[in-house]
Image: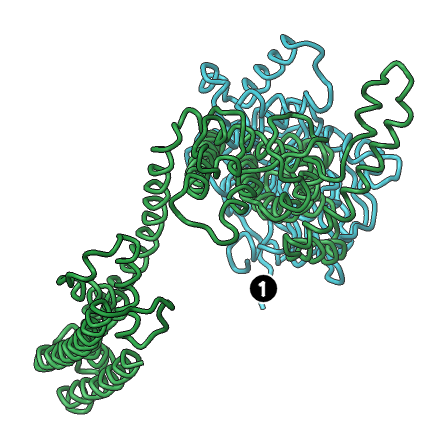
Amino acid sequence: MTVLIALALLAVFSGSVYLLGRRRAVALAGGKSAGLHSLPGYHGTWVALWAGVPAALIILLFAVFGSRVEDAALRTQVPAAVAQLSAERQVTFWSDAGAAARGQARSEIAYEGELKTAFDAKVAEGRRIGVIGLVSVLALSGVLALCGFLLAFPRLSKDFRARNRVEGWTSLLLIACSTLAVLTTLGIVMSLAWESFRFFQSVPPTDFLFGTAWDPQIAMRSDQVAAEGAFGAAPLFAGTFLIMLIGMAVAAPVGLFSAIYLSEYAGPTMRAIIKPLLEILAGVPTVVYGFFAALTVGPTFRAFFNWIGGFLVGGPMDSLGQYLETVQNQMALTAGVVMGIMLIPFVSSLSDDIINAVPQTLRDGSYAMGATKSETVKRVILPAALPGVVGALMLAVSRAIGETMIVTMAAGLQAKLTANPLDTVTTVTVQIVTLLTGDQEFDSPKTLAAFGLGLTLFAVTLTLNIIALGIVRKYREQYD
Amino acid sequence: MVAPMTVQSPLIRTAAPHSHHPVSLEPSKIVVRDVSVFYGAKQALDSVSIDIPGKAVTAFIGPSGCGKSTFLRCINRMNDTIPGCRVEGAVEIDGEDVNDKAIDPVVLRAKVGMVFQKPNPFPKSIFENVAYGPRIHGISSSKSELEGIVEASLKKAGLWAEVSDRLGAPGTSLSGGQQQRLVIARAIAVNPEIILMDEPCSALDPIATARIEELIDDLRQQFCIVIVTHSMAQAARVSQRTAFFHMGRLIESGSTEEIFTNPRESRTQDYITGRIG
């Protein structure tokens, strides 16, 4: 709250400084802005930036990291009574003291005797530290704002290049934003890597990558923590790969062919109808696809395969018939097909843009040679559009690998190492969800396994993207 | 109002070697009667009638938007590919109407090749570019025959010496002038009777242009060539016949020498002397 008020005050200060700077610039030019190097607004902006930005940065830093610094200051002196507590209780004590000092809700543990005295003392100390911190930060930002203004304002002159200075601030802002994006990515990768490292300390990476048994629930039992083989991720990756292949087998041809129809064959009216319809498909939430898969497609497939099985039983393919009669609702095929349907608009709309970007002169050239439409598409347009189409398909693959909801609802949860599309399988993302839903402690191999899976998945998608980029670049060199 | 005047000396020298001695032209290869073209409600061509001789170069000149390219595209029915375009009248090649229901535009376009303003080699190798037509029309029966056709076409287009050692390189790796000759080789590989050229040199530098013009003069021995050009000097250099279009109408056509030295219409004279356009 105090921080927000401080920021608002700072904004008001910057605003008035802007007006001051502007007026000063106009006065310097003798009322005519034509004599100035920069427009008066630039002068105002430059002064306002110096007055506002450093002070605002200090306040924001305090808002983000202030409580941590305060907690660290609180913990410098450990009371004797606290030092006797177990490590776990000490953590609770400190977080309770910090929370009480800030007026937040604390745990329900009651502190008695010496501990109570220590606790009350620490709460009082925490309040003191909080007040000192807040006052010092506010004072510092006030001084910074004032200094910024006092240093910047006298430098305004008729020839002052405020316009170029503001340009420098703009590029600084842009650099800061892109650095933030890069640092966030870096942070995510680092935390993935660190937690995975902890996981791989209890489960050897070879067991994880090549083990064929996945059963993290069993490993939860205290006598079997990280029992060998329970964290073999091979079935998960096989399942992910199988479902991705089925999905792409549906999405790639259907999406590509509808893109070709839309861009080469459809008249303006057809295009105006079909394109929005396809885009509606792209707007359906994946959870809706999920229950569509689980409640409609799954039972239909099951009925179909059971029906086929009924014909085969007793014939020369008796065992196949017997198997088909036992097929369940949940299978890789259901999840894959529905995922493919989900990816159709993704592939078709990207490919449509790419095919439309192929120059008309190439089409004219091919038609003038006496080629038909389909010959032109097959021999000229698709080769020319290939890099883009490969890129679109690779993006679709990345989405297929990352998709969770449909698979959770339609493919089952059993980790099986199988290439049979009629079997139930599970994928990496589904397992990450099951590992991390509900109350979890974040130091058992079971939950850490999620980070291991995440890191491996990240490595796989990254490799795919690099390969895709390589393919695209290779063809681009050849054709452009 | 410009008073009609008789011109004694040529306005633009027709310098090509052929123009110094009269050529006997073959009888009309393409006969066009009352052709009008509409793009939606807009009329682009208004009852054009002209006879185009075989084994000669006919140039269409006229200011931008006068309908000369539209007319060119009537001859191989390329206007079919433009939505909302309607063609009326008769375009006959060797006595057959190209707009007849019985005529397959795909077969027609194999007989009538076309070269465009901007070189448009396909995203394929040099060899595959030239082999494109023979492949889709099933002209060659064996690989060696196809190689023969490609080599002969590249030789006719004057490109063989420059590319014979890198037939596998992408067509797009050639220079602009080379690409345009590659596209001409692609057009003649299916052995057409007519070649339509829509401002084939407008994207090229003067040296490449001169090279293409020489080539056009060579090809005249074998094909009926119709060329649309903005350069009157080019029309004078390469063509035997010239037709002048203005505002969707054919104003005047005749031998190139006549059009450039002694035009019948004052509008033609105004255009070639640079007064309109």
- Is A93 situated left or right of B222 in this image? left
- Residue A94, image x, y percentages: 26, 63
- Residue A202, image x, y percentages: 37, 33
**Residue drawn at (79%, 52%), measured in percent from left and top?**
B86
Q: Quadrant of residue A322?
A: top right
Q: Which is nearer the eye, A46 or A267?
A: A46
Q: Which is nearer the eye, B221 or A431?
A: A431
**Residue drawn at (50%, 18%), measured in percent from left and top?**
B167
Residue at image mark 1: B3
Amino acid type at image mark 1 = Ala
Q: Residue A445, relative to residue A417: is it above or below?
A: below
Q: Quadrant of residue A84?
A: bottom left
- Is A99 situated left or right of A395 in this image? left
Q: Chain of mark 1?
A: B
The tint of chain A in the picture is green
Q: Which is nearer the eye, B106 or A58?
A: A58
Q: Which chain is cyan?
A: B
- Res A172 seen here: yes
Disc 1: CA contacts within 10 A as few (<14), some (14-19) or many (>=20): few
- Residue A217, image x, y percentages: 53, 38
Badge 1 marks a residue whose secondary structure is: loop
- Is B123 situated left or right of B39 in this image? left
Q: How many marks?
A: 1
Q: Which is nearer the eye, B264 or A457?
A: A457
Q: Quadrant of residue A159?
A: bottom left
**Residue drawn at (61%, 54%), measured in percent from left and top?**
B268
- Residue B246, image x, y percentages: 65, 56
- Is B43 situated left or right of A463 in this image? right
Quadrant of the rendering where the N terminus of chain A is positioned: bottom left
**Residue drawn at (55%, 23%), measured in percent from left and top?**
B157
- Res A156 seen here: no
